[in-house]
């Protein structure tokens, strides 16, 4: 049965201060699924995760069980790395998940590590999240002391170790290969892929990188079965979804919701409507890396495939009449990303908003490849002048052409993350940019 509003899996212990401790977690059923998982064969756990249609909650929405299946069977050493770097503007769920329920993440990681036969595992947590780090560090120590972690987990002979590592606050270190470089003590710059981390990752060993929310769903899948989890969701996306709603709504917040809920329902029923009695003009559906939706596109579900393919969402254009091609003739619409929904009301200065987004990407580009290093800076410069009433004729086409030059031509997806929203805003709010440029001419 699909989940309904109020079905809580990963947020069910939110607000329960006691659940943060091992005793409190165990008192609410914590670590009971681990015992079941340890009695299962690793490949059976992976098969349940495949059947669950759990998709990565870190941004790309890749099928988790399929990714686990890429680890070579004869690998001598495998690692599991939890990506808790959470830096995408608009996204603030992982820090709350860790704050309220650190042991659920640890239990999910031990189960996943058993499935992957991964002995030395890591949580890479964003450096600024100090209090969450302290909570996690304390929980890991408790789990070691109780025998859930160590060389002989609960007397089964299975070894699972977990190290919590703090990053230093660079957005790019959330990109999985930059994260692995940073963990190895190298400069946090993305690696060329392939090879993908599942084949050659941390210290050259096969490595699975998964987001916090992704891993926290694993105990529920092992407990109740992949089929049950899949049915909670919609289409090829199992389970529930956490969204972080910010911007111009009456009640912003972090909510665990059914996959099939639409943006209109999220804004009106969950968040009390757009503030000050205004209307929504633009909605960023999954962190600022994603092309926005306009007011006519909000009846689409927040589910992964719907956002990529629903024909109610207009395709993003490179220039008027020329769709951005994702390959194979598939038009770029938008993506569910990391669940960061930013609502902008009908008085929002869209060119200014795009400039602010581009300022972020220009600042966070690691500088390794030319289209991104030069292009994000150039985009920010042109967007700044348009947003500040100093735009020139031709600036819209100039921005579109720079963005097109970046997209698909870089080592990692940060380049796309700057180019796609640029093309999306220019496609759907072209008249706002034209008006901003005309204001100068007047
Ligand atoms: C620039 C950039 C930043 C990213 N930041 C994060 C992040 O903070 N947290 C995260 O989980 N994934 C982030 N990702 C996605 C990761 O590279 C990776 O796909 C993800 O951690 C895989 O986990 P999942 O399959 O569970 O989603 C980022 C990707 C890019 C390109
Ligand atoms: S796309 Fe940007 S952030 Fe990614 S590797 Fe290239 S320069 Fe670095």
Image: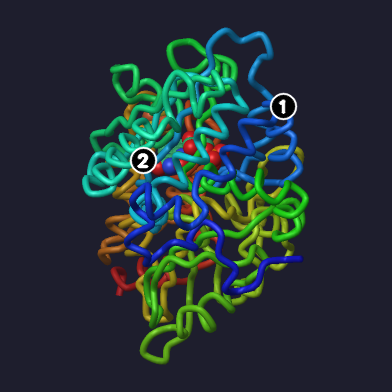
Q: Is residue 402 visible?
A: no
Q: Is residue 425 visible?
A: yes
* Image coordinates for residue 243, horizontal then vertical, percent: 49, 62
- For this rendering, which residue is in front, 169 or 419? 169
In the displayed orientation, state which residue is furthest to the front.
155
Q: Is residue 412 above or below residue 12?
A: above
Q: Which mark is residue 250?
A: none
- The residue located at (54%, 28%) in the rendering is 113
Disc 1 secondary structure class? helix
* Image coordinates for residue 363, horizontal then vertical, percent: 27, 41
Find the distance from the CA under tag 2 to the CA under tag 1.
29 Å
Disc 2 secondary structure class? loop
The crowding category of the residue bearing disc 2, from other C-alpha atoms within 10 Å (few below 14, some 14 to 19, many at least 20), is many
- The residue located at (38%, 85%) in the rendering is 275
Residue highlighted by disc 1: 43
In the displayed orientation, state which residue is furthest to the bottom.
277
Q: Quadrant of residue 307?
A: bottom right
**Quarter of the figure that contains the N terminus:** bottom right
* Image coordinates for residue 277, horizontal then vertical, percent: 41, 92
Q: Is residue 348 above or below residue 57?
A: below
Q: Is residue 393 left or right of residue 156?
A: left
Instruction: Indicate if the residue with disc 2 has its beta carbon within 8 Å of ligand 1.
Output: yes
Q: Quadrant of residue 391?
A: bottom left
Residue highlighted by disc 2: 85
**Looking at the image, is mark 2 or mark 1 earlier in the sequence?**
1
Q: Are marks 2 and 1 in contact (CB under 8 Å)?
A: no
* Image coordinates for residue 152, horizontal then vertical, percent: 48, 21
- The residue located at (42%, 73%) in the rendering is 344
- For this rendering, which residue is in front, 369 or 164? 164
**Quarter of the figure that contains the C terminus:** bottom left
The crowding category of the residue bearing disc 1, from other C-alpha atoms within 10 Å (few below 14, some 14 to 19, many at least 20), is some
């Amino acid at each position: 049965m699909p989940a309904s509003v109020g079905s809580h899996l990963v947020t069910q212990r939110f607000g329960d201060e006691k659940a943060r401790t091992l005793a409190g977690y165990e008192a609410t059923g914590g670590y009971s699924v681990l015992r079941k998982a340890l009695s299962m064969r690793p490949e059976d756990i992976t098969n349940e995760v495949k059947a669950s249609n759990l998709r990565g909650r870190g941004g790309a929405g890749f099928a988790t069980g399929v990714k686990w299946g890429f680890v070579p069977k004869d690998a001598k050493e495998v690692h599991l790395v939890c990506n808790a770097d959470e830096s995408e503007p608009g996204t603030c769920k992982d820090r709350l998940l860790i704050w309220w329920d650190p042991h659920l993440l640890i239990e999910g990681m031990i189960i996943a590590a058993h499935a992957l036969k991964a002995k030395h595992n890591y949580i890479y947590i964003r450096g600024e999240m100090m209090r969450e780090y302290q909570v996690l560090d304390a929980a890991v120590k408790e789990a070691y002391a109780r025998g859930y972690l160590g060389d002989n987990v609960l007397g089964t002979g299975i070894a699972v170790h977990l190290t919590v590592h703090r990053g230093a606050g660079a957005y790019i270190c959330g990109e999985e290969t930059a994260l692995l470089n940073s963990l190895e003590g190298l400069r946090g710059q993305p690696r060329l892929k392939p090879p993908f981390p599942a084949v050659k990752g941390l210290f050259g060993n096969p490595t699975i990188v998964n987001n916090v929310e992704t891993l926290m769903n694993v105990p529920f899948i092992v407990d109740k079965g992949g089929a049950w989890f899949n049915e909670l969701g919609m289409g090829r996306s199992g389970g529930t979804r956490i969204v972080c709603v910010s911007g111009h709504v009456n009640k912003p917040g972090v909510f665990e919701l059914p996959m099939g809920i639409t943006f209109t329902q999220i804004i009106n029923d969950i968040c009390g409507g757009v503030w000050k009695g205004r209307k929504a003009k633009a909605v960023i559906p999954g962190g600022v890396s994603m092309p926005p939706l306009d007011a006519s596109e909000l009846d689409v579900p927040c589910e992964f495939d719907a956002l990529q393919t629903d024909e109610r969402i207009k395709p993003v254009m490179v220039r008027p009449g020329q769709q951005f091609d994702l390959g194979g003739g598939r038009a770029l619409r938008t993506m569910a990303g990391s669940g960061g929904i930013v609502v902008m009301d009908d008085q929002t200065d869209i060119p200014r908003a795009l400039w602010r987004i581009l300022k972020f990407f220009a600042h966070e580009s690691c500088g390794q490849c030319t289209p991104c290093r030069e292009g994000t800076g150039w985009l920010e410069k042109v967007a700044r002048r348009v947003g500040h009433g100093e735009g020139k004729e031709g600036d819209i086409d100039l921005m579109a052409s720079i963005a097109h030059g970046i997209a698909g031509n870089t080592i990692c997806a940060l380049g796309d993350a700057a180019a796609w929203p640029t093309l999306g805003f220019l496609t759907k709010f072209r008249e706002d940019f034209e008006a901003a440029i005309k204001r100068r001419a007047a």
